[in-house]
Amino acid sequence: MDMHHIMLSHQQQGTNATPETIAPSINSWSAEYLDNMRRMWKENPQSVTKDWQDFFKGFELGRSLELVDSDSDTVRANQASVDSLMYQYRSAGHYIADIDPLGRAPKNRQPFALSNFNLQESQMDVLFDPGHLAVPNPSTLAVIIKKLNDTYCRHIGVEYSHIEDREQRRWLQSNMEPNSNSTEFDASTKKRILHKLIEASSLEQFCATRYIGKKRFSLEGSESLIPMIQELINAVSLHDAEVVTIGMAHRGRINVLVNILDKTYDQLFTEFEESWTEDYLEGGGDVKFHLGYSADIMTAAGKPLHVTLASNPSHLEYGHSVVLGKARARQRIQHDDQRKLCVPLLVHGDASFPGQGIVAEMFNFAHLDGYTVGGTIHFIVNNQIGFTTNPHDSYSGRYCTDIAKMAGAPIIHVNGDDPEACVHAVQMAVEYRQTFGNDVVIDMWSYRKHGHNEADEPSYTQPAMYEIIRKQKPVSDLYAEQLITQSIISETERTRMIDEIRNVLDESQQRVKENPVEPTIPPYSTTSVWKHLKGDATKRVIDTTVSKEKLATIAAALGKTPDDFTPHRKLQKLLTMRGEAIASDAPLDWGMGELLAYGSLLLEGSPVRLTGQDVERGTFSHRHIVSFDTITGLPFTALNTINETQATMCVHNSPLTESACLGFEYGYSLGDPQMLVVWEAQFGDFVNGAQVIIDQFIASAEVKWNRASGLVLLLPHGYEGQGPEHSSARLERFLSLCSNNNMTVMNPTAPSQIFHALRRQIKWDFRKPLVVMTPKSLLRHTKAVSTVSELTDGGFKSVIDDTSVNPTTARRVIFCSGKVYYDLLEYRDVISEEKRTSIALVRIEELYPFPAAEISAILKRYNDTEYMYVQEEPENMGAWHYIDATFRDTLDISLSRVTRRPCSSPAVASNKMHNIEQHRILIEALGLPSEQS
């Protein structure tokens, strides 16, 4: 249709927009008329007819092409400049975002100056192609820049250009740009956010006035964390999640316990009053800002959700690895292959996040088959200070979050004084996690109203910062005023909310002064996976035998590979031997004893998880629990082919680290106590890379937090001349941690022992961690073997007496543990019969709990004898000091000793010197002349 007909049609329709007079033009078009019509179309396209709409769409496109003259280099250059400008905002807009509630963060707008892109202010009204930006195409430069500013430079700044996956980047753009990175919440949601803010601030203010100076690690200045967690719970429930597992440090934990997990005020104030002493008897319990909690709640979406907050020590970030392991276990129990039903949330501090190396270890888990949890949502409470340390002394990068880029996680920086922006960020993070199964970080910038704790004075070290903080309004006040301005609530409603909460707080405190309540929940609820594990941990004898028929079935599976599988030629001999071992009553080595234990548990319905560095083959090439096809390289796990009804054998080589890996496995053992969870160190010497996990969790969690674990640690230990880094698992350190029947520590000497010990872990109706000093040279020692009958009969032996010596002829009883027994045996076997029959070698297989009854019974068999303890380790290491004190205190027996000389290092570097030292120990223990070997 030509212009004349368009104008005529418009006039005939009698539109009110038709100008009263139409000035003529040389081609019968009216410029004034066209300008008026175009203005109306720009304001509201529906105000003109479809013909006019089509005309102006074409006109705008033509104008943009005409203005930029698609054939000209200038046009292409200008468009390229605009494209670069858009990329600058998308990739770096976060640098100038208004994310600091204190207004101290530097903002350098120079990189966004038009001149950097060969653009000018005079071009603000020029039309350009905005690409995928959610504005009309074409749009003026002014419209494009406004959209980019609104999306990336207000109270939310987002880093996502580092993400390699284009689909994820585009998804983030499409979820931020159309809505300018904000959500218009309805009135009920706004009221819910405000109520959580008032609950959070009221609790902090109440504790500050009623419990002056008592540590609580206040959340004041960062209260938006509470509605953030609340709305995360709501959001994941809309995605049909069933569980949220939370890990966090002490800052704000009390607030989360009460205002998220519904721990009662009565429970909290009982802890403040310290009027419930039962939990603290015999050194038990923990401070209130370390304790965990679990609750089944109904979300605002009307869906049930189980929320658990893990207990946590003051060792920042370490507990988060535990939470990830627990989440992974929960996902397996739920058959959650997509990993969407259990969502882990980790709350970090801005100083610990870049400062603690375990954070990088955990991000490395993100996409590993053995450790992924389908994405972790990270909140950082960024109060811009670490105790007294400023950010420029805490991390080298621009942000504390830079480490998260290694996992390709989007990083959302948000102003903590804008609760709606915080909640918007949470909803986007949940949607992203559930869509892509990747980690996502929300960096909430806030401040810490007080010092590190309530007795601390922060202005000594940050005077300028705290001058600003003193003038800050609480976020609950800021948001309440915003909602009053919007007529969402009235001042009266706000006052009523505050008064109601404070009255409840006051009534609760008065109540517990008279009637304290148990402040923690029972460890094993009726709905817990732990509900059947309440047994008496002192009743340790249990049947762990397995029939020969069942063992033969397992062995046969171990000896087979698929028809199209080509094993390594050297491995085929081992597989054949394993397949025939039970049927032929062959001696069983350590590797076979371990594999038969796993296989028997699998047949009984108990799954097994084995992880650690190189566990699939085994550091010493002894296990070969996973075989690899020499042609395709594909793995094969024979233990998963025993029969069709068995449980699953999960085997994963771990990344080259100890701390986060051991924390993960400990958490897994908490999440699934019916699964045998085993972690093996490459060498026992390296276990101290996870010392925090051992000290703060494995050894003490039960007495502190009433949480048990059945985790197994396999720690290769023994002196074979390999130097100070490959000899000792620091047995002495584990024994020094033993008390309150908190764990089992053993140094076994036979394959049957590890067989029964591993089975016992699951057969017991209680759970205790098991620490095993495992052998190295004994893996192939011809005497360190067991018979099939030792698996089908008997059980684990805490102490093994020397049945080869007549007690009446014994003049020296040597107690020992581990590999040194075989060294002593070898030396004893070559001396005279008279001397040989006078020395009994008694093995203490289980060091803790100390087998007092068993040893006492053995001692009664020997009269008029000398008692000695022999170890390979230096005198100040190994089990000696523990054994010496325990024999004296428990059995009233004094022992002589033979050890290496005291040393600050576990072993010498020289193999020659090692042999000299080992020889000295053996001949001294056996009472041989120094020249006799």
Image (cartoon, rainbow, N blue to C red):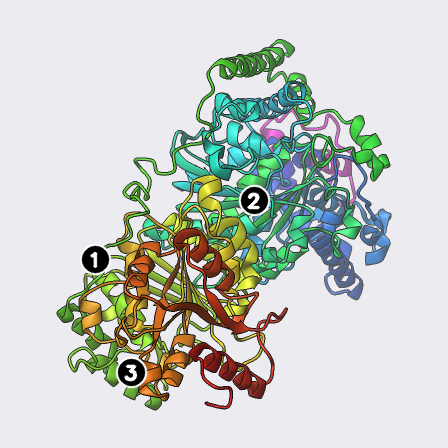
Q: Amino acid at mark 3?
A: Phe
* SS for callout 2: loop
Q: Residue at x 60, y 50 (%)?
A: 173
- Which badge, 3 or 2, comes first in the chain's sequence? 2
The stretch in magenta equals: 9-37
**Amino acid type at image mark 1:** Asp
Residue named by callout 2: 313
The residue at the far front in this view is 864
Q: Position of residue 654 (x, y in %)?
A: 47, 67
Q: Residue at x 60, y 55 (%)?
A: 359
As measured in the structure, the alpha-carbon distance from the residue carrying label 3 to the one carrying label 2 is 48 Å
What amino acid is found at the position of numbered circle 2 in the picture?
Answer: Pro
Position of residue 432 relative to residue 801, above or below, is: above
User: How many neighbours does mark 1 have within 10 angstroms: few (below 14), some (14-19), or many (20 or more)?
Assistant: some
Residues 830 and 398: in front is 830
Residue 18: x and y, percent? 68, 28
Image location (x, y in percent) of residue 883: 45, 60
Task: State whether residue 362 is above or below residue 221.
Answer: below
- Residue position for label 1: 543
Is disc 1 placed on a helix, strand or loop? Answer: loop
Whether residue 291 sits left or right of residue 712 in the image: it is right
Q: What residue is disc 3 on?
A: 565
Magenta stretch mostly in which secondary structure? loop
Q: Is residue 34 covered in magenta? A: yes
Marks 3 and 1, how far apart at CA:
38 Å
- Across and down, in percent, residue 810 comes to 32, 73
What kind of element bears circle 3? loop
Among numbered discs 3 and 1, the one appearing first in the sequence: 1
| Eye-nearest disc, 3 or 1 | 1
Q: Earlier in the sequence, mark 1 or mark 2?
A: 2
The answer to whether the residues at label 3 and label 2 have Cβ atoms under 8 Å apart is: no
- Describe residue 746's horizontal placement relative to residue 208 as left or right: left
